[in-house]
Amino acid sequence: MTETFAHSGSTSAPPQLKRTVRPGTLLRRHDDLVVDVAVAGGERDRILLGEFLALLPSLPSWPKRAHLQQRHRDGAAALLRWLGTFPGDGWQQRWVAARAEDDLDWIETLTDPADPRSTRVRRDVINCGINALILLRIVRPGYRFLNNYKSRTLYTDIRKLVCPKLFSVIESRADHLEINNFQRTDACNVVSKLVLHTGRAIDELTVDDLFTYRAWYQRHTGNGKSPTGLSLAWELLYGIADLGEHITLKDAVRYGQRPTLELVDAYGIHSVAVREVLIRYLDERRSSVDYGTFVELVGRLVGSFWTDIEQHHPGIDSLHLPDDVAEGWKQRIRMVTSKDGSTRPRKCSLDIVMCVRSFYRDLQEWSLQDPAWAQWSVPNPIRKSDVGGQTKARRTTTAEMHQRVRERLPHLPILLDTADRHRREQAALLAAVDAAPVRATIDYAGRSYRRVLPRYFTTARRRRLPSPPHRIEDVVSGEVIDVDKTESDAFWAWASIETLRHTGVRVEELLEISHLGLVSYTLPDTGELVPMLQIVPSKSHEERLLLVSPELASVLASMITRLRAQNGGTVPLSARYDPHERVAGPPLPHLFQHRVGWKWVVPATTTVQTWLTQTVARSGLTDATGNPPHYTPHDFRRMFATEAVTGGLPVHIIGRLLGHKNLNTTQAYMAVFDDELVRSYRSFLDARRAVRPVAEYREPTDEEWRDFQQHFELRKLELGTCGRPYGTPCKHEHACIRCPSLRVDPRARRRLAEITANLRDRIDEAQANGWTGEVEGLRVSLKAAAAKLVSVDRMQQRSTTQAESPVDLGVPVLTSEEHPW
């Protein structure tokens, strides 16, 4: 007996009839909520003309002059008489029958040609009647009419007439968020349109009301975007209207993680039997992989494999593929066909072929344990020879990664210096603009600028804010520069590059670093507190701790100080959306967040890439073709591993720092520059194996990890720290003044100056006594000490833009009573 597969939502209906959106679609459209115009009338749907005219003086814009009052009465009477010529049980039905929503040409037909007044005045008369008809809730216009109809007073009057207190609350929230006048007006107009169309009060609006307006706008414009001001209106309405659990519009319209059934049906498979087995197979695999990998698996197995098979062989209904069908698919999958008909080799063809091979092998293996899979245990169309080039492809990829590191690592100092210099220049420019009054001329870096105000910055707006935005105009070119944005981009580009190179974290882990991740570790022998950085689980789902070096501590301190200064002394809370898992995390004090518009957001991975690309272009670096090299955040991870192994750090320690489960993965990250490095590294490994004849590629023991941490204690010197590689003895006979590995602490400058002065005195004494041999040695030490003194002064000069005293990192103290944030 053949057993059929059952799953949630299964149906025998043709799958192509219930095709859903593509898996790559991130935002919902809500087309089912589209309503063109309301049919139900307002609360005064059957009002008489006399009653209507009697209500006109209650409007907020009712004029005081008699001739203007008569203009409002004439417009209202003309409009109602015109609507009365159309059939309907009320004014709303007559409005619909008159097709007043379609276009606004009918307004011109209501003007009296015999009226001696100007065309503008005659049109204003009709507009006064339209405004009164809408404001007094006689008709409920549709979004098409509201989008096309232009009125200077309609939206301001509705705010005074309906829920004025709630509109005041919305205005107060906009002031608190420091929103400019353009954004504020757009958001308030959206709320006004919702009130006019639905006939509800502000606190009676629902999620569907906002979704309906968004769906109508997307259908009307065809661009798939949300209406201007709707996102801000959502946040201003949150807590006033019932908008559910989502604080932002984008969170509310995201698809999130979609069921397997939807992902499979998005490809419109025709074979019901194959669709059933694919859904069940993917459900079995889903729990063992993350969501991003699962979506990729669906795309390869359903989209690239079976959908292609059905397109070229209609009617096929079995996984048992004939040889010619399988061979034809193998040939097609190697190439990608563009829209213009051109073809190019597919880079991931072997991965797709391996995915299909694993699919068939899984079915064969599972059929031995579960008879329900037996009918699908068919010969595998992918032979071992078809995936024989995978090892070669993997080696090619590794070689390309190593070549990227060889090309980029030598230029890393230039890139770091460019990012730091641009950060300091933009900070100095921002300070100069802040000190200059509006319309003043500023001379900076050989160019002249004039401080200007944006168009939205009115006098009332200026009174509400402590200082106007920092905008300047190039006197020569006329280019307007937003210094606030350029300075922010420069700072976060520098912070991203410095953190990536000091930690080797993935870009997703970089953006998830929060203030709560700064913890302290007590060394067991000395009791010294060492700062550690907690990296939350990412790709490997395992958290790890990284030792915070002094350089990294300076970067983190600068970030925390900046966030506190811009947010009233605290690190703001923000939620990060993970595009890989398609989930939004809880609000946390992320260290990588910047202000965009009216809110604090964690930058996307594409934003980090943009900062990096701009820094590379600014540095003037070029590759062999003369173009700027393409750096990615992951390149810094490979360079971190290469520098670590070059410094003598064991590979299994590097693997733990990088969060790798397999040390073969760690080895692929480490580029080799010359044969001497290979021989030195192998000699180092041989020496270690001779002392401890245990397999080197293993998880480090507690004692090894303790030795690694105590290594930093043994590098402490009078003038700073010793930078010799891990596990190596001193090769300079402890002549620290001469040693290039000595990293002088800026706080030891006074002691270094005393040593330098003492060396000069000893040289004078040796010359006076004729000790020529000692003079030569003292001169070498003096030269090295003087060079280190210059280096310390240069470091202090670079830090003039930062605080003179050490910045407290503010490591949060976790307690059991409450959350620290």
Image (cartoon, rainbow, N blue to C red):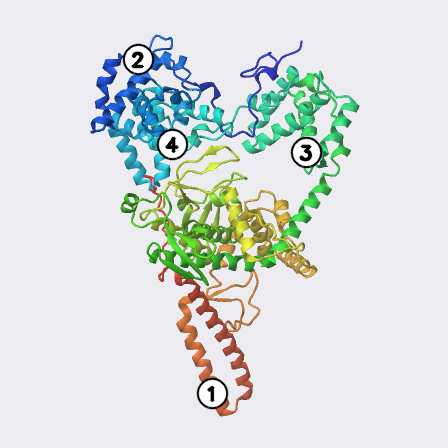
Earlier-in-chain disc, 3 versus 2: 2
Which residue is disc 1 drawn over?
A: 764
Distance CA(mark 3)–CA(mark 2): 57 Å
Q: Are marks 3 and 1 in contact (CB under 8 Å)?
A: no
Q: Amino acid at mark 2?
A: Asp
- Camera-side residue: 123 or 319? 123
At horizontal 54% and vertical 31% (from top left) the residue drawn is 291
Q: Which mark is residue 247?
A: 4
Pointer 1: residues within 10 angstroms few (<14), some, or many (20+)? few
Q: Secondary structure at mark 4?
A: loop
Q: Is residue 290 visible?
A: no
Does residue 513 lie above or below 723 as drawn?
Answer: above
Q: Nearer the viewer, mark 4 or mark 2?
A: 2
Q: Amino acid at mark 3?
A: Ser
Quadrant of residue 804 in the image? bottom left
Q: Nearer the viewer, mark 4 or mark 1?
A: 4
Q: Nearer the viewer, mark 2 or mark 1?
A: 2
Pointer 3: residues within 10 angstroms few (<14), some, or many (20+)? few
Does residue 305 lie above or below 704 as drawn?
Answer: above
Distance CA(mark 4)–CA(mark 2): 36 Å
Which residue is disc 2 drawn over?
A: 45
Q: Secondary structure at mark 2?
A: loop
Horizontal side, residue 269 vs residue 326: left or right: left
Distance CA(mark 3)–CA(mark 1): 79 Å
Quadrant of residue 64 in the image? top left
Q: Which mark is residue 338?
A: 3
